[in-house]
Image (spheres, rainbow, N blue to C red):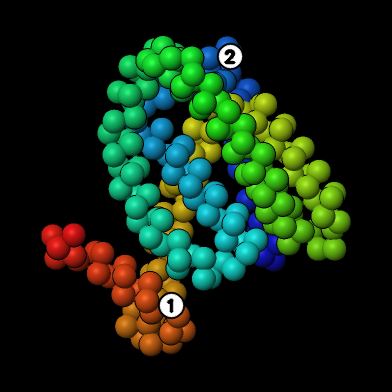
Amino acid sequence: MLIATWIITFVIIVAIGVYSGTKIKSANQWSGGDKTMGAVTLGCVFAAWQIGGMAVVGAAQNGYNLGVAGAWYSIAGSFYFIALAIFAKTIRNNMPGDSVPVYLQKRFDTRTYRLYSYAWIVYGFLYIPTQLKTVASIIQIAIPNLNVTLAMLIGLTIAVIYTSFSGMRGMSSVGRVVCIGIYALLIFFVLTTLPKFGGFSAMILNCPQSILLWVICLRSASSPGFWAAA
C-alpha cells in the first residue's frame, strides 16, 4: 500500500508539471525569463526545492534521525523563504539579464562570470552523481530487487523528460501543490499522531536520548530570550 501511494503521488506530481509545461509558448516562459512569477510563486518554488531535497535524502538514508537533525535547516529555511517572498520579485525584476551569470558579467566583469560558471561545473560533477544515486535508492525502494544501474537510468530519463517538458512553468505549479500539500499533511499528522504519544511532553520521554539535544536546541531557538542573548 505504501509503495502504491508513492507511485501514485509521483505520477500525479509529474503529470501536473508536464501538463503545465504544455502551456509554454516561448523559451522565456520555459526558463522563467518572462518574469511573470510573483513573490509567492517564487517562494513556493524554492520551498518545494528544499522540501524535495530533504525528503529524497531522508528517505534514502536514515529518515527519522535526519528529519530531526534537519530541523535547524528547516527553521532557517522558513525565515529565508519569508524574506524571499518579500524581496525575490523585486530582485528578479531588477536583474539586467535572464540568468545570474549574465548579471555578474554586466555588474562586475567577465572573470567573475567565468568563476561562477566554473564553480557550478565543479558543483555539478560532485552533486549530480550523489543525487542520482539517491534517486536510484528511492526507485529501488518502490521497485524492490531492481538493479542499481537500471534504477539510475530510469531516474535520469524521468528527470530529463520532465525538465524538458515542464520548465519553470511546471515547477511553479508543482511548487504550489507541494507546499500546500506538505503543510496540510504536517498539520493533519501532528493533530492525529501526537495524541497517540500522550502529547508533546510524553513523546519527548519516549524519544531516544540522542534526539533530546535537538529538541532542547529547537525549543531554545524558539524563545525570544535566546535571540535577545544572541
First in sequence: mark 1 or mark 2?
A: 2
Which of 81/174 is in front? 81
Where, by quadrant of the figure, is residue 46 drawn? top left
Residue 101 placement (x, y as % from top left): 49, 20
Which of 181/217 is in front? 217
Residue ID at (62%, 32%):
121
Total residue callouts: 2
Dot 2 alpha-carbon crowd within 10 angstroms: few under 14, some 14 to 19, many 20 or more? few
Residue ID at (59%, 57%):
57
Q: Which residue is mark 1?
A: 211
Where, by quadrant of the figure, is residue 193 drawn? bottom left
Disc 1 versus disc 2: distance between alpha carbons?
Answer: 48 Å
Q: Amino acid at mark 1?
A: Ile
Answer with left or right where residue 15 lies relative to residue 219. right
Residue 114 placement (x, y as % from top left): 53, 21
Q: Which residue is mark 2?
A: 27
Residue 26 placement (x, y as % from top left): 58, 12
Quarter holding the C terminus?
bottom left
Answer with left or right where residue 71 lies relative to residue 115. left
